[in-house]
Image: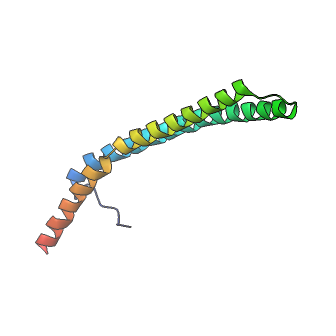
Amino acid sequence: MTADVSLEQFVHLKQPASDYLSQGYQISHQLTDLIAALKDLLSLIQEYTKSSHNLLDKGHIPVKDLEDLNLCQTQGIKHLRQAAEDIEAFNGFESYSKAFEKLEKEEIAHV
């Protein structure tokens, strides 16, 4: 882990660091939303699974419940893929990292 750097000494790192921190908050909010959506899906999946099991125990084929379970699975996959794409799009660390790398090279050049 790299030590903290004083902003007074390296002002040009403030904006990339701030941008990346902002993206961190956005990622946090997206993950919170994803968790809520997945909890809703989990509730539905549990409901359909229980209903399907009861119908099977009674000798019936739970066609509608199984279709609904498949829909929940599809929705879950869709939510996960979209969240992964959204989070992957945040590349603020790259600009921060490049600014920090430039700083390190300048420091080495002055030594």
Q: Is residue 28 above or below residue 102?
A: above
Instruction: Tell me residue 12's x, y (percent).
Output: 20, 51
Residue 32 lies in quadrant: top right
Q: Which residue occupies the foreground of this view, 108 or 61?
A: 61
- Residue 29 seen anywhere in this rendered image of the structure: no
Q: How many marks?
A: 0
Residue at position x 27%, y 48% from top?
16
Furthest residue toward bottom: 111
Q: Is residue 65 above or below residue 5?
A: above
* The C terminus, quarter of image: bottom left
Residue at position x 73%, y 35% from top?
46
* The N terminus, quarter of image: bottom left
- Residue 108 seen anywhere in this rendered image of the structure: yes
Residue at position x 42%, y 38% from top?
26
Residue 75 lies in quadrant: top right
Instruction: Tell me residue 27's x, y (percent).
Output: 44, 42
Q: Is residue 2 above or below residue 47?
A: below
Furthest residue toward left: 109
Q: Which residue occupies the foreground of this view, 100 or 48?
A: 48
Q: Is residue 62 left or right of residue 4?
A: right
Furthest residue toward right: 58
Q: Which residue occupies the foreground of this view, 64 or 24?
A: 64
Instruction: Tell me residue 19's x, y (percent).
Output: 31, 43
Name the image colouring: rainbow
Q: Which residue occupies the foreground of this view, 30 or 80?
A: 80
Residue at position x 74%, y 31% from top?
47
Q: Is residue 102 left or right of residue 35?
A: left
